[in-house]
Image (spheres, rainbow, N blue to C red):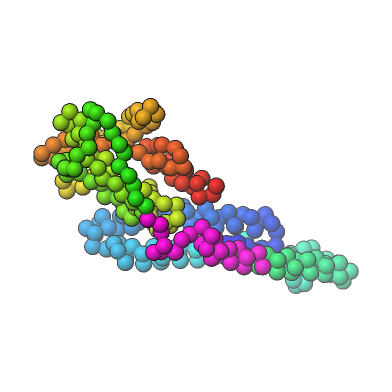
Amino acid sequence: MGFLFAGLIYRTWIRRIGFFLASAAVPILANAVRVFGIVFLAYVSGNRIARGVDHIIYGWIFFAVVMALLLVVGGWWREKPDQHGDVTASPATNVNETERRKPERQRSAGATVAFACCSLVAVGLAPVSIKIFWTPPGQSPRFELIAPVVSLPVQSTGIDVINWKPNILMPNAELAQSYEIETQPIELYIAYYAPEQPDAKLVSSTNALFDRTLWTRTREDDVEVNVEGQRLRAHETLVRSPQRSLVIWSWYWVYGKHTSSDTLAKLLLVKARFL
């Protein structure tokens, strides 16, 4: 929207580029204010408002107000034309200079038409990119994960005595396998997300490592672990229930790399999407 507005309203490239950059930066900064406002409304109202549909409605209203203000401010930067339709010039404009400026006006009109055509092409790229990069809902591939083979002193068991399973939303495949080592129970959980599934998020605040109604977190930190001779950093979370204590090691495997950082995992997902 800022791209089209800048091309139609401004004539100088400095103002066009400036407004285009503002169209990217202002909504992002305003979104931080929106998030704070939604959380604040929910807090002061005891979660009676700003939830569910209210969240979406307030968000769209806020976005519309921000865009309207951005366009109003953008209108203040517009170059004011003189009586001949050109950008404000010296009052001593004569007929010869008017004739000289006709080619300039023609070039300006041609540039505006070209700019508008480019904006239409940019808008048209959206459905094309969806067709190329995304798989329609219901067509995401299904996978079967195979439990890893272990050797003594680790033994595979079919009994889950820990009663633990993370709440991971919409993975393409899941694996939960119980083991024990010298009577110490171990639970392995793997959630796999295929790159063709656009609606699911590997890194998401809605994913939870444990059920907060059953377990209480006591401590967390990052630790270095050795998995099949490979050193990697895992996120260690200590939780406790009335029956037992549990140590959870968790990490992401994205684009062939292991990491316990949500931010790095997101960046690796972006890299994988582009490459």
Residue found 23% across the figure and 62% down from its top: 48
Please identify the quarter of the rendering in which residue 120 is found.
bottom right
Q: Verify whether residue 119 appears in magenta.
A: yes
Q: Main secondary structure of the magenta part?
A: helix
| Residue lying at 61% horizontally and 54% vertically, measured from the top left | 18
Q: Is residue 62 visible?
A: no
Question: Considering the image in quadrants, where does the N terminus appear?
Answer: bottom right
152 or 54: nearer the eye?
152
Instruction: Work out whether residue 81 or residue 272 is closer to the camera in this orientation and state it.
Output: 272
The residue located at (27%, 58%) in the rendering is 42
Position of residue 81 relative to residue 164, above or below, is: below
Estimate the x, y position of residue 219 in percent, counting from the top left.
24, 34
* Name of the residue lying farthest toward the left: 242
The quadrant where residue 196 appears: bottom left
Q: Nearer the viewer, residue 36 or 236?
A: 236
The region drawn magenta spans 117-142
Residue 121 forms part of the magenta stretch:
yes
Residue that appears at 50% across and 50% down: 273
- The total of numbered circles placed on residues is 0
The answer to whether residue 66 is above or below residue 157 is below
Q: Is residue 253 left or right of residue 187?
A: right
Give the camera-side residue of 166 and 116: 166
Is residue 188 something one can see in this rendering?
yes
**Residue 270: where, in percent of width, then height?**
49, 47
| Position of residue 239 measured from the top left corner of the image (x, y, whole percent) | 20, 38
Q: Is residue 10 left or right of residue 255?
A: right
Instruction: Tell me residue 195's x, y (percent).
Output: 45, 52
